[in-house]
Every structure is written in C-alpha cells, then in structure tokens.
Amino acid sequence: MPKPLIGITLGRKFKDDEGLFAISETYITAVERAGGIGVLLPALRDDEAVHRVFQRLDGLLLTGGADVDPALFGGQPHPSVYGVDACRDATEIALVRMAVENGWPFLGICRGIQVINVALGGTLYTDLPDQLGPQVAHRSEEVGHPVRIDPSSRLASVVNTVELRVNSYHHQGIERLAPGLKAVGWAPDGLIEAVEVPGHPFGLGVQWHPERRLDSPPHLALFEALIQAAQGGYNG
C-alpha cells in the first residue's frame, strides 16, 4: 500500500522584512516514523489553491506555533499574544472546515487544537495565567502535567491509557468548546487538552506536543493512527 501524503502546516517568521516559512523537524520525523510522507504546506493566499491542496493529500497535520488572532473568536487583546499571521490562520481554518465536511483525517497539535476549535465556532483564552489562573504550568515543558482522558473516547483507544503525562508549552487554550467537538482530555485545572469530532473517520486535536515524545509509545501512536486513517484503515 502506498504511503499516504500528509500535509504539514508551516509557521512563518520575518527576518529583515523577508518572510521565512519553517517548522520543527520533529513533525516531519513523526509522520515518517508512523509510515507517512510529509508534504510541507505554507500559508496560501488563494482559496482555490487551498482546495487543490486538499484534493491531492491524504491527511493533515496542524502544527504548533504562534498565536491565533483573538479577533477571529472575539477574544480580548493581550500583550502576550505574539506572531499573529492572518494568512496562516485563514489557510488552516479553511483546511479544518474542509476536513470536517469531507471526512478527511486530521490531527491538530498545540496551536492546531486551538485552530480546530476556532474554525468550528469555539473561543480561546488569550492568556491562560491571566484568565484561568496559575494552578497548572501550561508553559513549562520541563515540568509537564497529567491529562485525564475519557475512557470511552477514540483518544483513549489510540494511546491505550486513561491518563497521560504530557509536555506543555502554550499560553492560549480552549475556553468555549465549539459545537460539533467533544472534549476528551483535561488538565488538572479543567482546561480542555484534547478534542474529537464525533462520527468523523479521524478528527482529533491535542494541546501537548507528542512529536517531541516519539520514544513514548502512546505519543507515537497518535501519528500511527493518523497514518492508518489516511490509508483508510482506522476503525477505532
């Protein structure tokens, strides 16, 4: 069976007024180790181009990175918001909506789960320490925290556990869950850490960074499940 093509979204930075697309190599490694082929997706300014990309790929990986624009979900401005990229936001939101409507396998990581929620009508905390409180260190990868997982969820069947210790590096997070999404993972402070699209072949988002924990079977299993779904074989 041919290896599926997985679109991997890229972030964008600016140096000397020149835009540079980039992503951590760990995302590409994760897709390859799971049996797929990563295809790098820059932000696209043309709606037709987004549709053509969608038609040629087998699945989608929404990566971490800079913040989602608070204006897209009615959020309050905050001085900690950084790196907003309107073109990236628009591209990823369009891809999520097409993936949901067409049953296209996708996995969102960190920023990715936030994009999924905003694309489907939810809202975000613009800064967790200010709005939710400091009970859990959500921006301290070295410390991390546990995530409680719904035992009946697809996520639980993929990672084969109902509690998972995760790395954590973010300051935005889901506030109001989007209609059509189901929360299936929670941090100790109640923050939603994982979501699924019920009835979808494979629509999943996690707030942590499994691509940085590929030596841990539950984290690698997320990518393996995405690849299996992209091949048409996932039935979890």
Image (tube, helix red, strand yellow):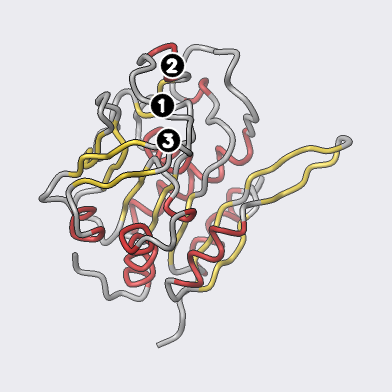
Q: Can you give x and y, in whole percent of width and height, for residue 223 in the image?
A: 39, 63
Q: Is residue 136 left or right of residue 149?
A: right
Instruction: Please report contact status of discs 3 and 1: CB closer than 8 Å, yes or no.
Output: yes
Disc nearer the start of the sequence (2/3): 2
Q: Secondary structure at mark 3?
A: loop
Q: Which residue is mark 1?
A: 137
Say which of marks 2 and 3 sits in front: 3
Instruction: Please report contact status of discs 2 and 3: CB closer than 8 Å, yes or no.
Output: no
Of 153 and 140, the residue lying toward us: 140
Split into 4 quadrants, where in the image is the C terminus?
bottom left
Q: Can you give x and y, in whole percent of width and height, for residue 136 in the image?
A: 35, 24
Q: Quadrant of residue 235?
A: bottom left
Disc nearer the start of the sequence (1/2): 2
Q: Is residue 220 left or right of residue 91?
A: left
Q: Can you give x and y, in whole percent of width and height, for residue 14 in the image?
A: 78, 37
Above-or-below relation of 142 to 223:
above
Name the residue located 54 percent from the left edge and 12 percent from the top edge: 77
Q: Secondary structure at mark 1?
A: loop
Q: Amino acid at mark 1?
A: Ala
Say which of marks 1 and 2 sits in front: 1
Name the residue located 26 percent from the left edge and 61 percent from the top edge: 201
| Residue found at the far front of this picture | 143
| Residue found at the far bottom of this picture | 1
Split into 4 quadrants, where in the image is the N terminus?
bottom left
Q: Which residue is mark 3?
A: 143
Disc nearer the start of the sequence (3/1): 1
Q: Amino acid at mark 3?
A: Val
Dot 1, crowdedness within 10 Å: few (<14), some or many (≥20)? some
Q: Which residue is mark 2?
A: 129
